[in-house]
Amino acid sequence: MMFVLIGLWTIGLLLIVTDPKRRTTRWIASIAFTGGSGGLSAVIDDTLKPLFYDKGWLTEPVAKILIQIETTCSLICYYGLPYTFLMFTIVYHPNYAVWSSRKTWVPWALLVPVLLSFGFDPVKDDPIPYRYVTLWTTPYIMAGIAILVHATLKERNTFFRKHRILTTLAAAPTLFFALFTLYVLPTFFGLYEMWRYNSWLIGFTLAVILISSFRYGFMGLQISIQNQKLDYTLRAITSGTAILNHAIKNDVGKIRLFSEKIQSEADQPDPHQLRDDIRVIITASQHIYDMIYRIQGQTQDVELHPDNVHLDQLLEQCVATLLPAMNEIEVERDFRYTGTIWGDKAQLAEVFTNVLTNAVEAMPGGGLLTVKLTETKRNITVEIKDTGIGMDKKQLKQVFDPFYTTKGGKKFNFGLGMSYCYHVIQKHKGSMHIHSKPGEGTAVFINFSKKERGKR
């Protein structure tokens, strides 16, 4: 058990030192510390007490102190491990940003059964009231495992999915085994010493964490001499420089497109059309300025400057800027929501423009572009659908990966668009999904929670 104690507490300490501000890091470190407390309890009983007795140090006061520490550590493990594991899986899930805004009471509610455990008296010689504790620890651990698996299946980014698989592999088998050895077997079969076999599975968990840390990184813990390509990629996509470059590329393209249009119509100008074209150029120039202002000084993440945004007006503006490039493309608008959401207008304009541009480029021979804005009881949804070439399952799995692109022949395409869009929508506590089939087109669904609509 000394191995379990040292291994778990070392991992917990490294995680806290590496990234103390991240919720997921703090919760998984809590799992390590609560599990390690069980190891310390065993070390006191198996090693320290016999050692102190042999040395003649086991006086009555010292024995009482050791028993008190042993009991406290044992309770921390029994009661803390299921709770910290379930809380970690909730925080670790991709939808946590949405859940946290709606269910702020959940962490406190989940703590109630833990605290009630102290109100039950254990059967003679039992460390805890097994029958009551098993009633809540079983659903806690099983729910945590289910959430981990669901989070892995839901993750669309292959880089993040690899990390989620490793995290699930490290945590799920160990907690499932602990459920039986710590709670089920003592409660229903009277087998109290099976927990000692946990050390074998904990050794497997530590091996997974160690190997993962060297090769891929684990929960922010990276023990590697060489820079990992995907780690560099992820940093690049979230850096202000990459985002700014992509935004400027899009808007410079609009300015050039409309400037050429004005030039081609210079001999017989239409004053009304000329004013509209110039307005698009001014809007694109202003968008570049807004993006520079937001990205300035930001080297690691997207910073939002939220305000009330009329999505129908913003979508109309984004469509208008791309009209000259829509040869033989019919645009169908269906805006059933005219209210506002709380968001960053410049960043959302960039998202919609990216998605619309992808849709237009997917229909080089023409087609139908559908732009819908609808609302449900809980969400406001933007749907952008094309009838273009579509994507196969392999492409669809990688579409949110940094630097992945299906437009390999284009010199200035960096594959940043959809990764950036996904990141921005997540920052708005929304979700983004893509449905596509080869030859049948692509539909992009962007959902915003109504909980964020009226914030100021």
Image (spheres, rainbow, N blue to C red):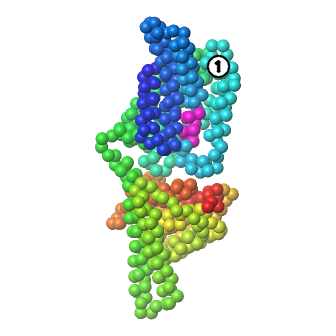
Q: Amino acid at mark 1?
A: Phe
Q: Is residue 416 left or right of residue 134?
A: left
Counting from the top left corner in percent of width and height, residue 112 is at 67, 34
Query: Is 353 above or below relative to 136?
Result: below
Q: Is residue 416 visible?
A: no
Residue at (45%, 29%) from the top-left corner? 9
Query: Is 151 above or below relative to 321?
Result: above
In the picture, the quarter occupied by the C terminus is: bottom right
Residue at (42%, 54%) from the top-left corner? 300
Q: Which residue is mark 1?
A: 188
The majority secondary structure of the magenta stretch comes to helix
Q: Is residue 120 left or right of residue 168?
A: right
Compare residues 308 and 184 and report the one nearer the observer.
308
Q: Residue lying furthest left in this view?
A: 226
Q: Is residue 449 visible?
A: yes
Counting from the top left corner in percent of width and height, residue 285 is at 44, 74
Counting from the top left corner in percent of width and height, residue 241 is at 38, 61
Residue at (66%, 25%) from the top-left corner? 118
Query: Is 368 above or below relative to 405?
Result: below
Residue at (61%, 50%) from the top-left corner? 101
Q: Which residues are magenta?
A: 83-90
The answer to which quarter of the image holds residue 213 is top left
Q: Residue lying furthest bottom in this view?
A: 268
Local SS, label 1: helix
Counting from the top left corner in percent of width and height, residue 180 is at 57, 24
Query: Is 11 above or below relative to 126?
Result: below
Q: Residue lying furthest front in this view?
A: 61
